[in-house]
Every structure is written in structure tokens, then in C-alpha cells.
Amino acid sequence: MKRKIFILLLAFVANVDAIIASKIQVSGVWYNLEDQNLTASVTFGRSDYQGNVTIPSSVTYNNKDYSVTSIERHAFYYCKGLTSVTIPN
């Protein structure tokens, strides 16, 4: 019984995460989007960042504008080909 409740709880939490945040790529930069407050955070991608990366102050996805508010921990971890990161004021 406890195992069934745990599995149902785990499935619910996973679905809530999918509703609250989604991971997308815009112009070579990966973001986690939060629909509740229309914010985006730079995150690690499916491949290393290369060369010069420019982070904008906002991104548009599905006709919604998201303010880029943070860079997640380890977003650029192991990006050996990364030469610079430009961030807005």
C-alpha cells in the first residue's frame, strides 16, 4: 500500500513540474521557463555551449515573453569550448 501511494505521489510531482516549468532552446541558449511568473532561467543544455554566448534580458516562446532572471548552478559546467558569456544589465 505504501509503495502504491509513493508511486502515485511521484507521478503527481513529476506532472506538476512539467506544468510549472519547461525546458526550451532559443538562439542556442537553454532555458527553464516558469509559466506562473513568466520568468526564464539559463540552464544546462543537451550539448555543451560553444564560443560566445549572449543571454538576452527576455525570450519569447509560444507568443509569451519571459524575463530572464537567473543563471542556474552548473549551467556552463564542463563547457570547454565556451569563450565568453555576455549578460544584460
Image (spheres, rainbow, N blue to C red):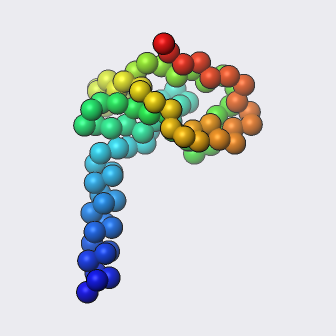
The percent coordinates of residue 49 (x first, y second) are: 64, 34
Q: Is residue 12 above or below residue 43?
A: below
Image point 34% across, 26% down: which residue?
66
The percent coordinates of residue 47 (x first, y second) are: 62, 43
Q: Is residue 77 above or below residue 5?
A: above
> In which quadrant of the rendered view does residue 83 lie?
top right
Residue lying farthest top? 89
Residue lying farthest bottom? 1
Image point 33% across, 67% down: which residue?
10
Q: Nearer the viewer, residue 60 or 55?
A: 55
- In the rendered structure, the answer to whether residue 85 lies left or right of residue 33 reads right
Is residue 57 something one can see in this rendering?
A: yes
The percent coordinates of residue 26 (x first, y second) are: 47, 29
Count of number-bearing discs: 0
The percent coordinates of residue 20 (x first, y second) are: 29, 45
Is residue 25 something one can see in this rendering?
A: no
Image point 54% across, 40% down: which residue?
73
Residue lying farthest right? 80
Q: Nearer the viewer, residue 27 or 20?
A: 20
> In which quadrant of the rendered view does residue 80 lie?
top right
The N terminus, quarter of image: bottom left
Image point 35% across, 44% down: which residue?
21
